[in-house]
Image (cartoon, rainbow, N blue to C red):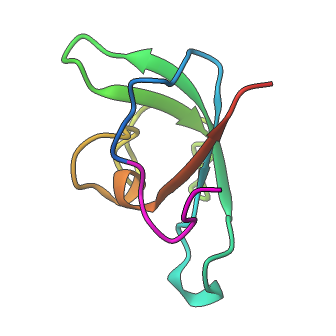
Amino acid sequence: MQNMNASIADLSSLAIGDLLFFDRDTQDGPRLDHVGMYLGPDEGGHHRFISSRKTHNGPTLGDEGGRSILDGTGDYARSFRAARRL
């Protein structure tokens, strides 16, 4: 079982459609509290996902509330905890 407190660095095994799980809220401990769906790499090679946001614009890739990428040092990259394929 993977450490749910650490972000995931190896993104090579992700496939389009995988569900992604995040621990975005630091106030609730290590509980998973956000989910998205992997879309694959974008034109710049960044690993993109789509998810519903707490902001008014709903499901988005517009990066409002944080960039929708899994690589780098952004909020979602740091809070990414697990991926599952159904």
In this picture, residue 56 sits left or right of residue 44 = right
* Residue 53 image offset from top left, x and y in percent: 59, 51
Percent position (x, y) of residue 56? Answer: 60, 52
The C terminus, quarter of image: top right
Can residue 26 be seen from the camera position used here?
yes
Q: Which residues are magenta?
A: 1-8
> Would residue 3 be counted in the magenta stretch?
yes
- Quadrant of residue 78 in the image? bottom left
Tell me the quarter of the picture where residue 45 sits.
top left
8 vs 28: above or below: above
Q: Where is residue 7, by image quadrant?
A: bottom left
> Could you tell me how many numbered marks the image carries?
0
Place of residue 61 in the rendered image (x, y in percent of width and height, measured from the top left): 45, 31
Vertical relation: 10 (above or below) 17: below
Whether residue 65 appears in this view of the structure is: no
Q: Quadrant of the N terminus?
A: bottom right
Residue at figure coordinates x 31%, y 15% from the top left = 42
Query: Residue 77 or 63: which is nearer the viewer?
Result: 77
Is residue 13 part of the magenta span, yes or no? no
Outermost residue, front side: 1
**Residue sitting at x 57%, y 43%:** 57
